[in-house]
Image: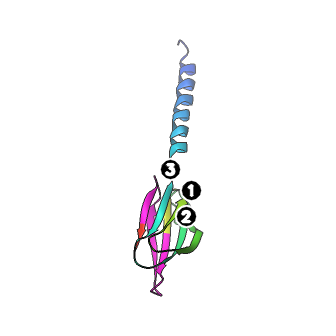
């Protein structure tokens, strides 16, 4: 190619296509598993991303012991609080990555 401008444009377009394909292929899903002998009341918060510390509640409810709650994250970063059915105490401010179907164990 004799035109360097055309070469630069083609290279930029190809790089954009490759990066877009990688972003689409990222799996931002995970599972919350109640691994202990109690049912677990779970509150899942989605982080807003881009280093922002804000979060918003996306799901809350009970998970039966030894069961799982599947979740598909928007950002891949989640916060969560939980409470065991045998205890009134809430365990909060927990954070985890949500990617590639990872399992987040809740005691």
Number of the front mark, 1 or 3: 3
Q: Could you tell whether 94 is left or right of 59 in the image?
A: left
- The residue at the point 57 percent across, 20 percent down is 6
The one of 71 and 65 positioned closer to us in this rendering: 65
Determine which residue is flagged by label 3.
27
- Closer-to-camera residue (38/41): 38
Mark closer to the chain start, 1 or 3 = 3
For mark 2, what is the residue? 46
Q: Is residue 63 above or below residue 78?
A: below
How far is the residue under mark 2 from the one under mark 3?
15 Å
Q: Which residues are magenta?
A: 80-104
Q: Where is 24 relative to 41, above or below?
A: above
Q: Are marks 2 and 1 in contact (CB under 8 Å)?
A: yes
SS class, disc 3:
loop
Q: Which residue is at 48% across, 83% downward?
A: 85
Spatial CA distance of label 1 from label 3 is 10 Å
In terms of secondary structure, what is the magenta stretch mainly? Answer: strand
| Residue located 55% across and 57% down the image | 72
The structure residue drawn at horizontal position 54% and vertical position 38%, both measured from the top left corner, is 21
Coloring scheme used? rainbow
Percent position of residue 38, x then y? 44, 79
User: Which residue is situated farthest in the top direction here?
Assistant: 2
Q: What numbered label is drawn on residue 11?
A: none
Q: Position of residue 17 (x, y in %)?
A: 55, 33
Q: Position of residue 66 (x, y in %)?
A: 44, 71
Q: Position of residue 31 (x, y in %)?
A: 48, 62
Asked if residue 103 lies in the magenta stretch, the reply is yes
2 or 3: tag closer to the N-terminus: 3
Circle count: 3
Mark earlier in primary sequence (2, 1): 2
Proximity of marks 1 and 3: CB atoms separated by less than 8 Å = no
User: Quick one: quadrant of the C terminus?
Assistant: bottom left
């Amino acid at each position: 190619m004799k035109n360097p401008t055309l070469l630069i444009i083609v290279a930029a377009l190809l790089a954009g296509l490759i990066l877009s394909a990688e972003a689409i292929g990222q799996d931002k899903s995970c599972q919350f598993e109640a691994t202990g002998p109690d049912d677990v009341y779970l509150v899942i918060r989605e982080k807003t991303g881009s280093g922002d510390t804000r979060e918003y509640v996306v799901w809350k409810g009970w998970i039966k012991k030894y069961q799982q709650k599947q979740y598909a994250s928007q950002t891949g970063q989640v916060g969560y609080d939980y409470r065991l059915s045998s205890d009134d105490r809430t365990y909060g401010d927990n954070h985890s990555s949500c990617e590639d179907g990872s399992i987040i164990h809740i005691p």
